[in-house]
Image: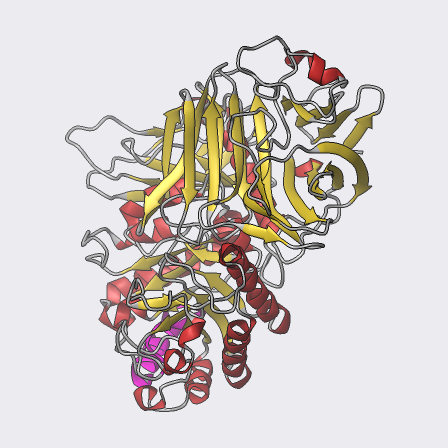
Amino acid sequence: MPITYDEQHRIFTLNTRNSTYQFMIDSDGNLLHLYYGRKSDGFMKNFLHEQPRAFSGVFGYSQDSQASQDESHSLDYLPQEFPVQGTGDFRSPLLIVRDEFGTFGCKLRYDSHEIRSGKYALNGLPAVYENSGDNASTLEIILRNDRLNLSVKILYGVLPELDIITRSAIVKNSGHGKFTLEKLQSACLDFTHGNFDVINFQGRHAMERQFERRELLHGSLVIDSRRGMSSHQSNPFVILADHNATENFGRCWSMMFVYSGGFKAEISRDQYDQTRFQMGLEDEKFSYTLEPNEEITAPEVIMTFSSSGFEKISHNMHDCIRKNICRGFWRDKARPVILNSWEAFYFDISGEKLLEMARYAKKLGVDMLVIDDGWFINRNDELHALGDWTPDEKKLGMNLESLVKKINAIGLDVGLWLEPEMVSENSNLYREHPDWAFVIPNENPTKSRHQLVLDLSNRDVRKYILDSIFAILASTNVKYIKWDYNRSISEVYSHAAKNQGKVLYEYILGLYEILGKINAKYPEILIEGCSGGGGRFDAGMLQYTPQIWCSDNTDAIDRLYIQYGTSFAYPASVTAAHVSTCPNHQNGRITPLSTRGIVAMTGAFGYELDPAKLSEHEQLEIQAQISRYKSLREIITDGLYYRLSNPSENFCAWEYVSRDKREFLLNVVIPQNHGNMPRIYVTPRGLEPGKFYRNTSTGEIYASDALMDSGFALPVLRHDFESCAYLFEIV
């Protein structure tokens, strides 16, 4: 069993294939964290060093309790599993409670626990699930506060074969009064010593998930999103690592939040050089009142540990997301090669233009044409019609059903762009239901992209969205939805809510409810998540949308940095990347079509251009790209991914190795060339030792051990943005 409890020492041990997680119940009912690291036997109580500390309060339940008499036993410095405000611990807590009289403070005490086979699920929220052979187990621990009749059910899920441990918590009011949660987070790791770096993935629209590494000094480092979504600015995935950790050396720990709304990760170093690493819901605009018999579930955090660098963290997370987060019909299927209409026509679409595009696309080898924004009535710019999901027959020259049938007859499937969570002020929907948008009464609303956000915490809004989408899907043979979300949530006011502090949390639950019902009714429709590109690239969305548009920035060189950061947590199979025209529409850069193809072959592949404007040579090159991608799709989407260099270096190289190690694909781009450059050597990893591999392009044979030791010499590349890609097969 991956989870054990030693009753004599009151110690819980959670084991995965390569790690051990351990904590204990102390004499006064507190949960004290002991260890999370390399797999180990025995008990790690020796990491607890208690001594009297000035200005450190003592936590006790009665005057006569053992802990209250022992001034060395203070939660102000002891490592904890679920720290709460009001126990003498002045570090950041997971839980802050305010009772109905305005009093802050909540002491929790161990009540009971249960160990069971199988992985827990969460009501209304996405979570890691188990597959056959995962050997998953659940630990459930109940903590109680008698004054408030409050209970916290802490949930631990262990997937030993994946080296994954998950955490969540459910807070319940079992009393007759009410209280308010001012903060609720899901997971905490306390380290009694160590010098660490924090790695996070910051960014902005069109430059998401940029790798950032810094030393953790005294005080608190907060990485969060206050935008009502996981955001372009900060991704809900953070790594804590030893100073000397590299791709394949050193200890590191990661947390990922399985949630698509605001989040908060806090990493702090205290007065005694101890480190606390925690993650959960953003507490700004969160004030959740629990009425009697009401409960709230904290979204899940996925944790993994590596003793051998970031590479192992990535492999663990990739496998977990690919097989234990993504669900449904498309989880293991090859994704279609897509041609999207947006950068070709923007709003200026017509049926004839789309049919001409479809005919070109079929010749190129494309599988699906996606009709992007502009297909519904009065939608000729960003100012109008969001929310009015009626096809514009005049603009299209026919009804949508007929257009889709004609494209199908050419030999392509059809996808459709939607932005169901938004509404334009100039729309029939807003004129009929202004109370359905987040608008504070008697104030002018804050707009972004000229649009407002619909209140998904309102069941009437959810019903309207589902009815609108189901009407389209019932009448047309649409095989794909691009689900967009093009602004953040600023002010929050719901006409339907009794408690405004619950709205943002319930908005995300409403989003998941809508997506879940679409998945259930139309399981074979592929939904691609999008939020101005990668503004909602998170594990929560991936449970419903098994691929996400990586970024609105399709420039090949910028994408090297965006996709590099993305790869630390997310597998290629969920990353949508397309080739676009040049000069690039985001930054004006001109790059070779061959390089654009290599960079975009990182998962769900496609194009953002007008094929009618391509030269004959470019059309032939795209045909060859699509053919090559389809031949390599399995190794790209299911292989082990290796980052061989940082794009800030003289070259950017990455590698895919098949699961059986019989093939590997090596990709290299030169972001910038210089005069008389030294020869570049790329050192592959993850090959089968003692074997030989043939370069399928040149026929040359290489010893695997020599490649992994001394590297592969690239051909001389003389120009900026040149690239090469080689497939090697075992001999």
What stretch of residues is rendered in magenta? 351-376
Depicted 57 relative to depicted 352: above or below: above
Work out which quarter of the rendered image holds the N terminus and state it: top right
- Residue found 58% across the figure and 70% down from its top: 518
For the rendered model, the colour scheme is secondary structure
What count of labels does the image hold?
A: 0
The spot of residue 251 in percent (x, y) is: 53, 22
Depicted 704 relative to depicted 43: above or below: below
Q: Nearer the viewer, residue 235 or 563?
A: 235
Depicted 603 relative to depicted 162: above or below: below
The spot of residue 717 in percent (x, y) is: 24, 38
- Residue found 61% across the figure and 40% down from its top: 660
The spot of residue 575 in percent (x, y) is: 45, 52
Q: Tell whether 591 sits left or right of 657.
A: left
- Residue found 49% across the figure and 41% down from its top: 569
Q: Is residue 361 magenta?
A: yes
Instruction: Name the residue at the left extreme.
Output: 675
Q: Tell whether 549 sits left or right of 679.
A: right
Q: Is residue 693 magenta?
A: no
Instruction: Name the residue at the top extreme.
Output: 51
Q: Quadrant of residue 191?
A: top right
* Residue 521 visible in the shown view: yes
Q: Nearer the viewer, residue 623 or 284?
A: 284
Q: Nearer the viewer, residue 231 or 312?
A: 231
